[in-house]
């Protein structure tokens, strides 16, 4: 058997975009002939995806899966909405999110190098290449977030427009408030808050809003300017902070008041520990 040195494997990896282990297997099968090894990979459907790698991926889906001790959020992109709605593409996204929730990888790179649960003979990266070949479009795993669950929290997952927008909210204080957490996630999907509370707004952002407000009320007495500016800043805070926003299902109360109301009903203090709002594009 021909000795396959690491440089040969690396060269074939760079040429084909296929994982190191599959490149080595192809080189062994080809007796060290890199051209023949490339052909072997193409015949197996592993190397044809390389031509599609440079194509722009603006469509896709975002998936979240909850396991016993984690929630995974994963964004996977493709070129057209047609493929994004394809059953094979959607199943791939779901299976990836399931695996991520189970294995809790520290990064996308670590995740891509894992053996794929559905076909352990391939890594996730190698299976992605097969899906590219099968569907005929570039496919990219763009983002991955692992949320390690708190035992005293509830997690609400809300998906909108077939995964174009996805929100995960953690409500702290009870493990039995999934419905509330999901309702708040639905609110976040619609209202797009940028911050949880006023204290989360960076000072430079506040200063900029103050400058804009002041420029709109020139040539007025100082006490009038101060009052108007305060009103404009309050309106800004109410718009961008989740806790200050009017609840979309009952605009007579804010999200903060919704939490207070529910806390009294269950006799346990509830708060929002955090949220993620992801959107395609």
Image (spheres, rainbow, N blue to C red):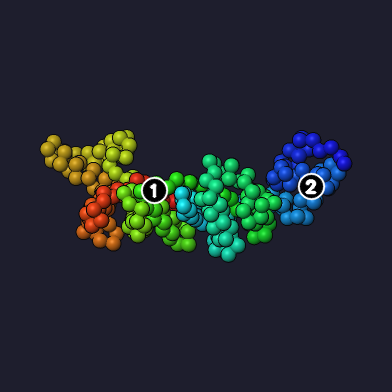
SS of the residue under disc 2: helix
Answer whether residue 11 is visible to the viewer in this image. no
The CA span between labels 1 and 2 is: 47 Å
Q: Which residue is mark 1?
A: 151
Task: Classify residue 207 by image quadrant.
Answer: top left
Q: Is residue 86 above or below residue 14?
A: below
Which residue corresponds to the image point at 36% horizontal and 46% vertical from the top-left? 274
Q: Which residue is mark 2?
A: 26
Q: Position of residue 142 (x, y in %)?
A: 54, 48
Mark 1 or 2, nearer chain start: 2
Q: Position of residue 43 (x, y in %)?
A: 78, 55
Q: Are marks 1 and 2 in contact (CB under 8 Å)?
A: no
Decide which of 44, 136 is in the foreground and name it. 44
Answer whether residue 10 is visible to the viewer in this image. yes
Q: Is residue 88 left or right of residue 163?
A: right
Which residue corresponds to the image point at 54% horizontal and 41% vertical from the top-left? 107
Mark 2 packing: few (<14 Cα in 10 Å), some, or many (20+)?
many
- Foreground tag (1 vs 2): 1
Decide which of 268, 172 is in the foreground and name it. 268
Decide which of 213, 107 is in the foreground and name it. 107
Q: Is residue 274 left or right of residue 139?
A: left
SS of the residue under disc 1: loop
Disc marking residue 49:
none
Task: Classify residue 206 by image quadrant.
Answer: top left
Q: Position of residue 208 (x, y in %)?
A: 30, 37
């Amino acid at each position: 058997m021909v000795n396959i040195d690491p440089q040969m494997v690396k060269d074939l990896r760079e040429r084909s975009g296929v994982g190191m282990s599959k490149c080595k297997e192809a080189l062994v099968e080809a007796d060290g002939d890199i051209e023949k090894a490339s052909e072997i990979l193409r015949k197996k459907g592993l190397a044809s995806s390389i031509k599609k790698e440079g194509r722009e991926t603006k469509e896709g889906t975002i998936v979240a899966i909850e396991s016993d001790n984690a929630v995974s959020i994963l964004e996977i992109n493709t070129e057209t909405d047609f493929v994004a709605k394809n059953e094979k593409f959607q199943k791939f996204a779901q299976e990836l999110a399931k695996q991520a929730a189970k294995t809790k990888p520290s990064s996308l790179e670590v995740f891509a190098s894992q053996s794929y649960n559905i076909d352990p003979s391939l890594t996730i990266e190698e299976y992605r290449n097969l899906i590219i070949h099968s569907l005929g479009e570039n496919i990219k795993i763009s983002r991955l977030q692992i949320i390690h669950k708190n035992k005293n929290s509830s997690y609400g997952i809300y998906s909108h427009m077939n995964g174009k927008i996805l929100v995960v909210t953690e409500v702290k204080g009870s493990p039995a408030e999934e419905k509330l957490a999901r309702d708040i996630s639905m609110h976040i999907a619609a209202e797009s808050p940028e911050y949880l509370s006023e204290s989360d707004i960076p000072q430079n952002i506040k200063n900029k809003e103050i400058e804009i407000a002041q420029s709109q009320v020139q040539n007025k007495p100082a006490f009038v300017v101060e009052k108007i500016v305060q009103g404009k800043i309050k309106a800004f805070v109410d718009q961008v902070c989740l806790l200050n926003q009017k609840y979309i299902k009952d605009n007579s109360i804010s999200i903060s008041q919704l939490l207070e109301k529910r806390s009294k009903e269950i006799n346990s203090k509830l708060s929002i520990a955090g949220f993620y709002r992801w959107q395609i594009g």
